[in-house]
Image: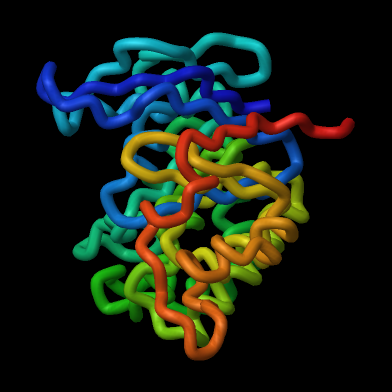
Amino acid sequence: MLEVKNLEVVYQDVILVLRGVSLQVPKGKIVSLLGSNGSGKTTVIRSITGLLDVQNGDITKGNVIVDGEDITNFKPSKIVEKGIAQVLEGRRIFSELTVVENLRLGGHTNSKEINKNIDKIFELFPILKKRSKGEAGYLSGGEQQMLAIGRALMSEPTYLLLDEPSLGLAPKLVDQIAELITEINSQGVTVLLVEQNANMALNISHHGYIMETGNIVMDNSSKKLLDDQDVREFYLGLNAEGTKRKSFKDVKHYKRKKRWLSWAT
């Protein structure tokens, strides 16, 4: 299990970004982390993968635990060795390298299995095999997202952290990415899915957390979140016909609401 316990993060020594965040990602599950832009979702992922230094961030309180081991403030390379891989927001592929060269970079921590793992990626993403010798910069947005996911899978992670994989993609491609995430999970990879697209995320995940201004304000099974009227209104845009869409602060029971996950085994 991947756990975040009571995490506080400060940027540039003064800006408190995470305010006691706790969540759990049980093995074999897809867990979604939802919230608007700036709510702190990406900071949670960066805290797990050791990339806070990029933005002068520091964990000032709390812990990140994977399979019972405290990995708080481990170096990113060490965290990868612990079975955690991240797909960054915006894909971040190496556009001037070929598809195969991008994949090989993702497998540097497991060099003996590179060729075998490339074959696995091509089986999962057949379009990448067709484009294997071409420069990655010429791929479509959806194909680049597949390459970014494939590159992360080259390290054979136990936990895959996806940051906004649907960002900038057409609805048809979003559905395709959702199907691929479900397939990856079915092969034994645990997924933490960070998304603004709540409808997509909740429809493929087992459990969901909702963030606002650095706090977890709600968590429940994905099915219950999909059925929750306030979630439907705020995050899915499904307010009752003819009613005025309320602001988030108008819903009293969202405030200070934290229900920590208790998974049935």
**Above or below, 154 relative to 229:** above
**Above or below, 198 relative to 219:** below
Q: Where is the C terminus found, in terms of image quarters?
A: top right
Expressed as whole percent of the image width and height from the top left, the position of residue 105 reads: 37, 45
Q: Nearer the viewer, residue 106 or 233?
A: 233
Q: Nearer the viewer, residue 7 or 218?
A: 218
**Is any atom of residue 153 visible in this view?**
no
Residue at point 48%, 34% (across, down): 256
Q: Quadrant of residue 250?
A: bottom left
Q: Residue furthest right?
A: 265
**Above or below, 95 relative to 207:** below
Expressed as whole percent of the image width and height from the top left, the position of residue 1 reads: 68, 26
Residue at point 42%, 61% (across, down): 196
**In the displayed structure, does residue 121 sit left or right of residue 217?**
right
Residue at point 52%, 24% (across, down): 4
- In this rendering, the count of numbered labels is 0
**Above or below, 166 relative to 184:** below
Q: How is the image coloured?
A: rainbow
**Is any atom of residue 175 visible in this view?**
yes
Expressed as whole percent of the image width and height from the top left, the position of residue 205 reads: 67, 56
Q: Quadrant of residue 3?
A: top right
Expressed as whole percent of the image width and height from the top left, the position of residue 137 reads: 24, 71
Residue at point 65%, 57% (across, down): 225
